[in-house]
Image (cartoon, helix red, strand yellow):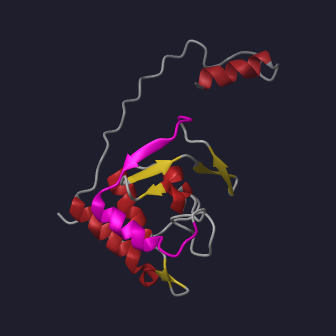
Amino acid sequence: MPSGSLQMAVKGGRLPANPAHGLNLPKVGKASKQYLSHVEVRDLADAVDSLGKGMFRGDKNGYGLLVRVLAYCGLRWGGAFSLRVKDVDFKRGLLEVHRTIVEVDSFQIDSEPKDYEARSIPVPASLLAELATHVEDKEAGSPVFAAARGGWLGGGYSISVGSIRPPR
């Protein structure tokens, strides 16, 4: 990769030669994926819900539910943030991911998913019941998980849970 960028600089007249030409870099191995246990997911969701008592201006924020949806449905951040109430198919038990929210220079852009294909994601029955309660009074086009002050959640918003230690 670095060699390609440097080669473009040579072609553009910005460098006399490519210093990375012929350089053999070691292959980088993939890091093993780590998954939370059910207990760790529950503890994390409870900790997130305890922040601000899970409320903002008297409304339940649903961020603990968001943690559970991310953990058990395998959504990407942008897919979870872009979910609208109408994207939850309660009859079939699915989340329909048609859009994604991408942050570029602190601006949120509504775009197509990474692979340009909509996905239907199964939802455990226990989460469907929580989602039904969570979206009960929201309009069909509203975000399922809104930012505390309204609008879409985004990667620039972070929730600090302090020093939670997973159970051993």
Residue 144 vertical position relative to residue 80 in the rendered view, above or below: below
Q: Is residue 136 magenta?
A: yes
Residue 3 lies, in percent from the top left, at 61, 21
Q: Is residue 126 above or below residue 149?
A: above
Front one among 136 and 134: 136
In-image side of 167 versus 61 (left or right) = left
Residue 80, position as x, y percentages in the image: 49, 55
In the foreground, 41 or 96: 96
Location of the N terminus (image quadrant): top right
The number of numbered discs placed on residues in the rendered structure image is 0
Residue 143: say if magenta: no
> Which span is picked out in magenta?
115-139
Q: Is residue 162 visible?
A: no
Q: Is residue 17 left or right of residue 72?
A: right
Q: Is residue 59 above or below residue 143?
A: below
- Name the residue: 56% across, 12% down: 22
Residue 142 percent location from the top left of the image = 59, 65
| Residue lying farthest to the top in this orientation | 22
Residue at position x 77%, y 16% from top? 11
The x and y percentages for residue 95 are 43, 52
Determine if residue 95 is in view.
yes
**On-image quarter of the C terminus:** bottom left
Residue situated furthest right in the rendering: 13
In the displayed image of the protein, which residue is found farthest to the front?
91
* 65 and 93: which is toward the camera: 93
Left or right relative to 87: residue 45: left
Q: Going 35% across and 63% down the picture, which residue do you hit?
A: 128
Looking at the picture, tell me which residue is in the foreground, 29 or 133.
133
- Against 158, residue 9 (above or below) is above
Q: Quadrant of residue 123?
A: bottom left
